Amino acid sequence: MLQFGLRLGSKPRQVVTTTPRSNPLLADILDDPFTVSTRAPTHANRMHLADGFLKSITETYGNTRLGRQEIDGDLLLDGVGALWTAEVLEQARKLPVLDTLDRIVVAVDPPVSSGEAADECGIIVAGINIAGEPLNWKAEVVEDGSLHGASPRTWAERAVELFHKYRADRLVAEINQGGELVASLIRQVDPNIPYTGVRASLGKGRRAEPVAALYEQNRVRHRTMFPELEDQMAAMTVGGFTGKGSPDRVDALVWAITELMIRPVEKFQTPRIRQL
């Protein structure tokens, strides 16, 4: 529509400025032979930015797809805002085996209802290898124990079963929908489970972005192929989920990795090492 407003004068022009998130319109503009393009990375403006800010964003998003887009100003055309590409997921399965997991969590994204028409209950088991500085820590997705159409009692029993199977340290569950009922269900199965209820305050895409960045830094490994989980991951974008239904497996994954690697780092004085 702006083009129609440039019909008068000797040399009408328009300026488009943006962080180059991929979309067909922007690609067409850049392909136009009359377009003159220029770009500047965040570091080109470093004289006006705090050193701590530059250090933080470089350590967090350096060498990631999101970093190339937001820090370097690159237009990435291999997926419209995709957080996990096929290449990233493939690499996650090729990373070196973690000999030990110092902390293990079971994360649950409960469905609102039960029965065949209900969403899945996302249940993900993940652990972390604490070696050196936090930026060197590695995580591993151990098992996808998600259930479809399960009753509240059934998915609670499954989560507790996996907790004991892997001798986990904590069970984490989203409580936006179920509130205290989620904790009550878990306690009915095992009253001694170390439990944390987490509440989502951001959209799914924004919650998933930091976790996706860890994958791009090769800091999260998949023990095996998790087809249903990885299909949901491939459909998660910065704007939200583009697949069918609800991304309950991805939500549980995000809570698990957030608990292990993104929340304020807990000082483990005597970590409990176990062989798996």
Image: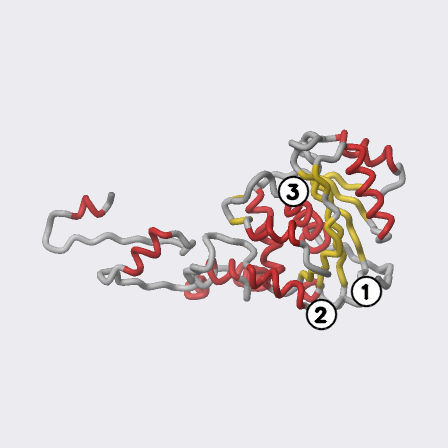
Identified at 68% across, 54% down, the residue is 226
Q: Of the numbered discs in the image, which one, if any, rests on residue 96?
A: 2
Location of mark 1 (residue): 100
Q: Tell me if 271 is positioned left or right of 11 in this view.
A: right
Image position of 8 with respect to 20: above or below: above
Do tag 2 and tag 1 residues touch (Cβ < 8 Å)? Answer: no
Identified at 74% across, 35% down, the residue is 150
Identified at 19% across, 44% down, the residue is 4
Q: Residue furthest bottom?
A: 96
SS label for mark 1: loop
Q: Tell me if 63 is positioned left or right of 134 in this view.
A: left
Foreground of the two, 29 or 199: 29
Percent of width and height locating residue 46: 45, 64
* Alpha carbon distance from label 1 to label 3: 28 Å
SS label for mark 3: helix
Location of mark 3 (residue): 248
Three-letter amino acid code of the residue under disc 1: Thr
Three-letter amino acid code of the residue under disc 2: Pro
Foreground of the two, 265 or 177: 177
Disc 3 residue crowd, few under 14, some 14–19, many 20+, Cα 10 Å:
many
